[in-house]
Image: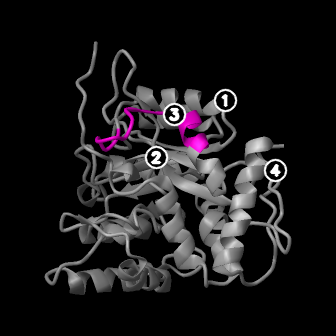
Amino acid sequence: MTRPKTQNAPSSVGQPSSAPAVSSVPHTTRRGFVMGTVALGAAAVSEPGVAAPSPNQQPIPILDSHIHLFDGSRPQGAPYVGPGGDSPTTSLPSDYRKLAVPLGITGAIKVEASPWVEDNLWALQVMQSDDLMLGLVGNLRPEKPDFAELLVRHAKNPLFRGIRHGNLWGYDLTKMVRDDAFMRGMRLLSELDLSLDIANPTVPLLEAAVKLNDSVPDLRIILDHVPKLGPTPNTQAAYENVLKVLHHRKNIFAKLSAVIHRRAGEVIKDLEVHRPRLDRLIDVFGDDRILFGSDWPNSDGVAPLDEVVGIAKDYFADKPRELQEKYFWKNSLAAYKWKQRRS
């Protein structure tokens, strides 16, 4: 049976055998960062997985912790096929590789953009042949009777790194944290050493993440697109209160993704407009719990991938090299425990 298509955008992974080689130089300039990543991209085009060092130091690898894959040309279609406009309705690893490798991206985590259970398998299949793909954040319903069976089965594939929940597909985490079956599913997720992505942040959603962390403290929780959340005068106090709590929660990570986004209908690309919020979020989550993610190709609705990567590079250009390494790849390893696939 052909399923109806919907166009709602999803506003919107064990220790590797050998981590990407990086330098211990404590600081880098904007020019050094850009030149290094260009060199990395050029090397990767000619020989995937091999990073050419710059004259002074090796470039910093970039792990994109948030991309979407889908294929609207399938007989059954796909529930999400991009943001519209000029963005293609088919998004496959080969499409992403062409854009990502020249930018210095050496790996990616695919975050599910479909509520269909069968699309977890579809995603694993299309990712298997491309070693740029390091993990899948899938979609399974923890409150359903078959969740444990499905989770254990999918977790046998090392690419399967967790599931997502939040404010999408009609899900409501603020209610589910009070559901016994759902919480049993969360404990199983933690026991299997998998993670939970939480999408489309609101203040109540952040509060629900704290409640979940209270109940399942060992579960790694990743908050997606946190820079998009702008508190209103009515929610400012609650927002500040939950940020104070999140500051101390070592297993709650934040994706500084969707930095470029629509605000009051306007797409703002000026880094100086976004800088205060990014500064605040780093103060809250610290150096060890922030991740890079592009949200490609959903991000096509506001900016091409090179601009999405570029604004992140610009913001971190004057930061210590150690912090850049953590944001651009090391923290994703801690959050998702993805396995390196290149020899």
Q: CA distance from mark 2 to mark 3?
A: 20 Å
Residue type at the position of mark 4? Val
Q: Earlier in the sequence, mark 4 or mark 3?
A: 4
Q: Nearer the viewer, residue 16 or 110?
A: 110
Give the image location of residue 188, x and y in percent: 50, 48
What residue is shown at x 62% (from left), y 66% (from top)? 328
The image quarter containing residue 200 is bottom left
Residue to which mark 3 is pinned: 92
- Residue ranking furthest to the left: 234
Give the image location of residue 185, x and y in percent: 43, 47
In front: mark 2 or mark 3? 3
Secondary structure, mark 4, is loop
Residue to which mark 2 is pinned: 163
Give the image location of residue 36, x and y in percent: 73, 66
Residue type at the position of mark 1? Ser
Answer whether residue 220 is visible to the viewer in this image: no
Residue to which mark 1 is pinned: 129
Q: CA distance from mark 4 to mark 2?
A: 30 Å
In the image, is residue 89 part of the stretch drawn in magenta? yes
Provide the residue span drawn in magenta.
Answer: 82-98
Q: Nearer the viewer, residue 179 or 201?
A: 201
